Image (cartoon, helix red, strand yellow):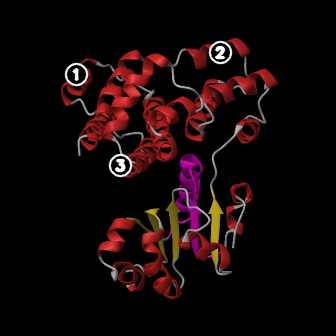
Amino acid sequence: MIYKSYLIEQNLESLTEKVVLFYGENFGLKHEFKKKIKNRSLENETFDFYQEEIIKDESFLIREIKNISLFQKKKIFFLENVNDKIFNILEQNIRHVGDNQIYLFADILDKKSKLRNLFEKQQNLACVPCYADNEISIKKIIQNKLKDFEGVSPYIINLICDNSNLDRTKLNNELEKIIICFENKKIIKEDLEALLDARTNDDFNLLKDEAIIGNRKKTNEYLSDTIIEPDKDIYYLSLINQRLTKLYQIKKQAKSGGLEQAISNIKPPIFWKDKPIYLKQLEKWSLEKIRKVLNNTYEIEIQIKSNYLINKNLLLKKLLLDICSTANS
């Protein structure tokens, strides 16, 4: 059964099926769904697995499903980066789910995908396509989040929308910052412009770029010299996410027309002076590696937001070193 993503956003409880597939290129939306499901499942046991773990041992999933919880709790399984390779294993084990739940997260699945067709056609399964945001959907999010604020003019909405680059993850980070900074619920145009324009950090961008290129020497040098400012951790994470997401989009488009053409076609456009950096980074990154690191950054974001005692500086530096290492793997 197919559900519209915007309807599930409005009412997650309407998604009553025990096995659900979220697929599409919208990383931010899929992450939001996963976070909401986890938040409503705090009394249950949750498990995160990658498809690779399940394929290596075909009995792995059924064992995990059938193992009785020590606390007699319902089990919630999150399966990441799935595609048609998991089809046979899943088809054989769906009937054993019982009172447990399985949520699958996939990239773009075309109309011929066996996995997509299975979830679209079976009434006891749910399929939620997560397509890329556009200007209309981004503006609706802004209007909804700031509906109780004064001073939200069309200009303000356009300013926030343009600054997001139609990236839901970046948008949510920006909106959180705005809500905190304008705690009196009154947005002043000049203050908002200053807030959005002041968000630059050349040193961190250099560090981020060298880590993604996989330059160990320069990454270590910049790590020693760069001051990671307090309270900007989510912003720095968004910079990493934006670059990796853009590399992912270019890689996907390059399958049909080559890298040069993909870079020329990407929206928003890449500045000419940044093109050599993108080309170096694209040489080092496969779609699979990008997906894994993006999932990692989302998990780090959750850790930062849920634990104010955590060492954010150390967490970010470790992430950058891990990115550098992954680029060379």
Q: Mark on residue 289?
A: 3
Q: CA distance from mark 3 to mark 2?
A: 36 Å
Q: CA distance from mark 1 to mark 2?
A: 32 Å
x%, y% of residue 16? 66, 74
Q: Which mark is residue 112?
A: none
Label 3: few (<14), some or many (≥20) within 10 Å? some
The residue carrying mark 2 is 193
- Asked whether residue 38 is drawn in magenta, I would say yes
Q: Residue at x 54, y 58 (%)?
A: 34
- Disc sitting over residue 224 in the figure: 1
Give the class, few, some or many, for how many residues have Cα within 10 Å of label 2's Cα (few <14, many ≥20).
few
Q: Position of residue 230 (x, y in %)?
A: 40, 25
Q: Is 121 placed above or below 292 here?
A: below
Q: How many numbered discs, if any?
A: 3
User: Which of the pair 152/266 is nearer the observer?
Assistant: 266
In the rendered structure, which disc, 3 or 2, sits on the residue that comes first in sequence? 2
